[in-house]
Image: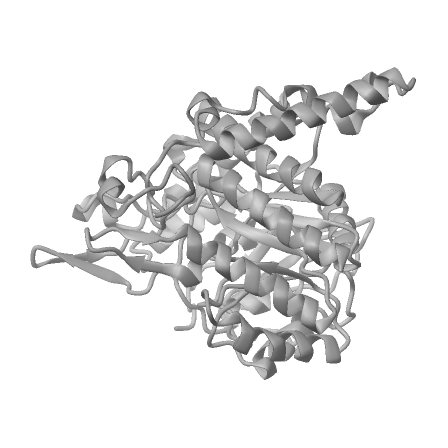
């Protein structure tokens, strides 16, 4: 469909000759040059059927006057870090919730997500010696693409749940009605989450001296948790050794705080446009809703609204690469989104499914490399391995997730390329949503006991730590060969 709203959002206009038509009426001819609103002249997929366009207009106009959630300097810091990853000098960990809930934007909820991200990151660094760039699916991952626009329960058909930013998960006409006011609620919940994250990451919670404290009791009892405790002992002794050698570890900021960047799928262009701001110093537009945004496998149409919108912003851009992506399509997307071939600009996130990487991934890698692009290649081993179990729950097997990661590393080794990162849906809670595990295996009969996700199944903390050790082994083997 093509957006044909007849109102004009009030957007902050740049000073000077920025060359945009941000304030032009939506029914005016679309200029050839990019502008924050030029996506409106393109087909747009995966959008809710907003019932009240005046409410949508009010939400956009209100958002356009709100402070940015992140700043250009932070966005450019991430681009610089990702450039290092693309050059083989780091590793990307992008992880967090499948679909954030407004109700989870509490200190305890955010602390739990951050805790498991810190554990996975420190295990990757410990196992490989590489710096880990940490990007959370947090502080804005409220929208979800769906396979169908509606669902039927007991003969009743209602709009599908598209994430808290659009509607509610309860199966009632009122909850499932898209509500533009939720765009404003999403902004304020993102702002609150970012405030808590900044306080935790800069205020001592991320201190390496807390490495044991990150291990929750239910994790510590597991085999993976006990292995983590051993790694934490080694890290603690290393810090003591450095101090004994005269290194003033108290003054080393990197040992006491981290930089956690935020990301989400840029699924709702009305929301993203309203938070896109012009930086006069750099003469560049930035989407200030997150440090990094990505285009999903369902919205990567080369002539589509999502590609058009993200093509003009200065943020790092992710592209989900599914099994239907052809080398030609991916090469065209890279050309559109990264015409200057800048390291740190693109993160290509393969989500192919276990058993498919050996056939599908090599031609994609070669097409991008031969075209002169140097993106970060990351593996999303979650979305290609989802199925419905015998008990009726949508789930994933940890063994499939690990297998897809292994295939990703093997293919990169064969092609002489750096496997740049991993993209996970996980939680710090003791949920039973994904099957498998070592000595603490989640079985199909366990899923109903603590199945809490709003959309897709997530790894729990124990499974996340177990996978982190495996990824560290893959990467260590890659670097030693």
* Residue at the image point whose x is 40% and y is 54% from the top: 144
Question: Residue 229 is drawn in which quadrant?
Answer: top right
Residue 172 left/right relative to 89? left
Q: Is residue 195 visible?
A: no
Name the colouring of the figure: one colour
Seen in the picture, residue 246 relative to 443 is either above or below; the reply is above
Q: Residue at x 70, y 32 (%)?
A: 258
Residue at the image point whose x is 68% and y is 75% from the top: 368
Q: Between 261 and 376, which is closer to the camera in this rendering?
A: 376
Question: In the displayed structure, does residue 309 sit left or right of residue 343?
Answer: left
Q: Which residue is at a point 29% across and 40% down the rendered structure image?
A: 451
- Rendered-image quadrant of the C terminus: bottom right
Q: From the viewer's side, name the closer residue of 262 and 348.
A: 348
Is residue 470 depicted above or below 47 in this figure? above
- Residue 66 seen in the current view: yes
- The answer to which quarter of the image holds residue 194 is top right
Task: Point out the residue furthest to the bottom here.
Answer: 328
Q: Position of residue 95 (x, y in %)?
A: 54, 45
How many numbered discs sit on the rendered protein? 0
Q: Position of residue 36 (x, y in %)?
A: 61, 60
Q: Position of residue 436 (x, y in %)?
A: 37, 47
On-image quarter of the N terminus:
bottom left
Horizontal side, residue 80 vs residue 261: left or right? right
How far across and how far down the image is residue 132, in percent?
70, 43
- Between 107 and 350, the residue placed more toward the observer is 350
């Amino acid at each position: 469909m093509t957006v044909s709203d007849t109102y004009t959002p009030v957007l902050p206009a740049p000073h000077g000759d920025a060359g945009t038509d941000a304030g032009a009426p939506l029914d005016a001819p679309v200029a050839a040059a990019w502008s924050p609103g030029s996506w409106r002249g393109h087909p747009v997929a995966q959008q809710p059927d907003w019932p009240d366009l005046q409410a949508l207009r009010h939400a956009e106009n209100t958002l356009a006057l709100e402070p940015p959630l992140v700043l250009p300097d932070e966005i450019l810091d991430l681009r610089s870090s990702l450039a290092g990853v693309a050059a083989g000098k780091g590793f990307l960990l992008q992880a967090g919730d499948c679909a954030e809930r407004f109700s989870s934007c509490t200190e305890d909820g955010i602390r739990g997500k951050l805790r498991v991200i810190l554990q996975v990151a420190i295990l990757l660094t410990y196992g490989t010696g590489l710096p880990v760039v940490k990007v959370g699916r947090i502080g804005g991952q409220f929208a979800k693409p769906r396979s169908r626009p509606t669902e039927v329960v007991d003969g009743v058909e209602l709009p599908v749940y598209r994430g808290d930013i659009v509607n509610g998960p309860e199966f009632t006409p009122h909850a499932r009605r898209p509500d533009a006011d939720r765009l404003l609620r999403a902004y304020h919940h993102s702002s609150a989450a970012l405030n808590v994250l900044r306080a935790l990451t800069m205020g001592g919670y991320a201190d390496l001296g807390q490495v044991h404290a990150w291990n929750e009791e239910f994790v510590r009892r597991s085999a993976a948790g006990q292995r983590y405790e051993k790694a934490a002992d080694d890290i603690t002794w290393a810090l003591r050794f450095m101090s004994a050698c005269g290194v003033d570890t108290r003054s080393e900021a990197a040992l006491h705080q981290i930089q956690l960047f935020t990301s989400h799928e840029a699924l709702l262009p009305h929301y993203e446009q309203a938070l896109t701001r012009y930086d006069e110093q750099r003469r560049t537009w930035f989407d200030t809703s997150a440090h990094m945004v990505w285009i999903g496998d369902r919205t990567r149409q080369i002539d589509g609204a999502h590609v058009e919108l993200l093509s003009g912003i200065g943020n790092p851009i992710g592209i989900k690469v599914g099994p239907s992506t052809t080398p030609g399509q991916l090469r065209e997307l890279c050309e559109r989104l990264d015409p200057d071939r800048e390291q740190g600009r693109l993160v290509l996130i393969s989500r192919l499914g276990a058993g498919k990487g050996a056939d599908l991934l090599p031609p994609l890698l070669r097409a991008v490399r031969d075209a002169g692009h140097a993106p970060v290649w990351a593996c999303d081993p979650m979305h290609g391995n989802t199925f419905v179990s015998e008990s009726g729950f949508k789930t994933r097997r940890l063994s499939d997730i690990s297998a897809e990661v292994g295939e990703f590393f093997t293919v990169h080794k064969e092609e002489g390329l750096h496997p740049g990162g991993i993209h996970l849906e996980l939680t710090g809670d003791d949920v039973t949503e994904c099957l498998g595990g070592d000595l603490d295996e989640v079985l199909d009969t366990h899923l109903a006991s603590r199945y809490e996700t709003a959309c897709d199944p997530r790894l729990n903390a124990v499974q996340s730590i177990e996978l982190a050790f495996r990824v560290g082994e893959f990467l260590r083997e890659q670097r030693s060969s």
